[in-house]
Amino acid sequence: MITPSLPARCLLLAALLPCLLRTAPAAPPTAAIDIARQLNDAFIEVADRASAAVVVIKVAHKPDAIHANREDNPFFEFLPKEFRKQLEEEMEKQKKRERSGGGGRREPVFDGQGSGVVIREDGYILTNRHVVDGADKIKVRFRDGKEYDAEVRGVDKKSDLAVLRIATKGLPVLKFADSTKTRVGEFAIAIGAPFDLDYSVTFGHVSAKGRTQIIRDPSMDQDFIQTDANINPGNSGGPLVNISGEIIGINTLIRGMRTGIGFAIPANLARDIGERLILEGKYVRSWLGVAIQSLSENPEYRALVKGVTDGVVIKEITPDGPAASSELKPFDVVTAVDGRAVSTSQMLKNEIRGKKVGSSVVLDVNRSGKNIKVNVKPGEWPEAPEVAFRQPQRTDEVEDADLGLTVRTATKALADELKVKLSEGVIVTAVESGGLAEKKGLKPGDIIKEINQTPTPTAKAFAAAVKAADLKKGLILNFVTKGVSKFEVLRDDE
């Protein structure tokens, strides 16, 4: 056999290479790669379409406005430390500018920035209140570079929402999704202008829904959507959208830098408040004047309720509030509002908030195992209701060592002394230190009206009701404290 030389073998391989390549075509993309490409294209499409309706908001503040806003803005404490430091430095710079500027009118200095989203084609833009607070002048800029002067149509302090108006029409608009149908785990895309980086797009997921008590402010009556889509200072007021390009929330809060924990106002609340601000320039909340707690949050209450497993317990009734003039009572369990089921405190708040002030609302209530209807007319949310209360005078007395309190029958003289409307009950005159009553917050001056939903008009009736109760299972005590109707469960766990 004749073996070809090395040069000959190389020439042969070069001649055969085109044929070899033709007979071994590249493998087609797998189905998984096709899906990934489609998803990639979907993100690109959503970001492109949604960004057309997103605006960058530039704000020139009035003198000392930033300082004033800091005092009453519950969102300030949630700014990351490094950003808060930058803002405080800007405050000091502004102070120096004001001191050196004399009394003459200066050109506005645009020292604040946020984001917003167009919600109506005729020039209405939704953003955060804290973005435009104290504004002397506002400008909004679109992705195509067009810029407009804007004016504030209305703000809602409690939700931290605001609506701006610009003088133009035919704008691209983003639609609102139904945020009650938003699901934990679905894609979430944030669009805004963080750190002056206009039209930044980040994506992640809906991490959680129904986040409450994010802000320690009793006037903040809403919940939030939590997301791990990267949200930074400057994203405030911009939209959080789903894979369909619909608004599922308005980006509002972050918890620390680079933590992946951001919060957005749910779309349904943002839409309702936005529409009311457009029509009326303000948003009036309705309230019942009650303190509530979900049955699911308190197994102790749940064990004592008959015939219902989900609902919202009426824990307190505020005097002179809307519910005070209704048939509603402490330890009632509300299961529906105008036929819409409620199983959590937040669901009840959401249902009542948007009701028309003074309109009749029907509550489905479970009371002592019976289902009844209670009509109540929500009132306008007051700023800070306060009730004065004074110590009662003495009358006949019953001491109960197991509960750790002493009571006396309420009389007209006592009611006059307390300057409250006379009602049947017994008045707590002493509370034993470390006893059951003290542990549940009872104190001298509280008026006990029922034990296990049995009226206690006299000290004698009170004693009989306590005797008939089983402290091992728990005793439901309805009482009035500083004018507020509420209940507590006293149980001997020893």
Image (tube, grey):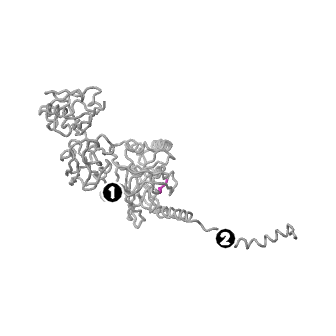
> Quadrant of the image for the N terminus?
bottom right
Residue found at the far front of this picture: 1
Say which element carries label 2.
Answer: loop
Q: Position of residue 477 (x, y in %)?
A: 22, 36
Q: Residue at x 49, y 54 (%)?
A: 204
Q: Nearer the viewer, residue 190 or 367?
A: 367
Circle 1 is placed at which residue position?
Answer: 272
In the picture, the quarter occupied by the C terminus is: top left
Residue 356 in the figure: left or right of residue 67: left
Q: Contact, CB < 8 Å: mark 1 with mark 2? A: no
Q: Earlier in the sequence, mark 1 or mark 2?
A: 2
Q: x and y percent of residue 91 in the render?
A: 46, 43
Corner quadrant of residue 488: top left
Near mark 2 (Cα within 10 A), the count class, few <14, some 14-19 or many ≥20, is few
Give the quarter of the image for residue 456.
Answer: top left
Residue appearing at x 69%, y 72% in the figure: 23
Left/right of residue 191 with respect to residue 448 in the rendered view: right
User: Callout 1: helix, strand or loop?
Assistant: helix
Q: Position of residue 478 (x, y in %)?
A: 22, 38
Q: CA distance from mark 1 to mark 2?
A: 58 Å
Magenta stretch, residue numbers: 189-193
Q: Amino acid at mark 2?
A: Pro
Crowding around mark 1 (Cα neighbors within 10 Å: few <14, some 14 to 19, many 20+) is: few
Residue 25's label in the rendered image is 2
Image: 205 above or below 45: above
Q: Is residue 183 magenta?
A: no
Amino acid at the residue labelled 1: Asp
Q: Main secondary structure of the magenta part?
A: strand
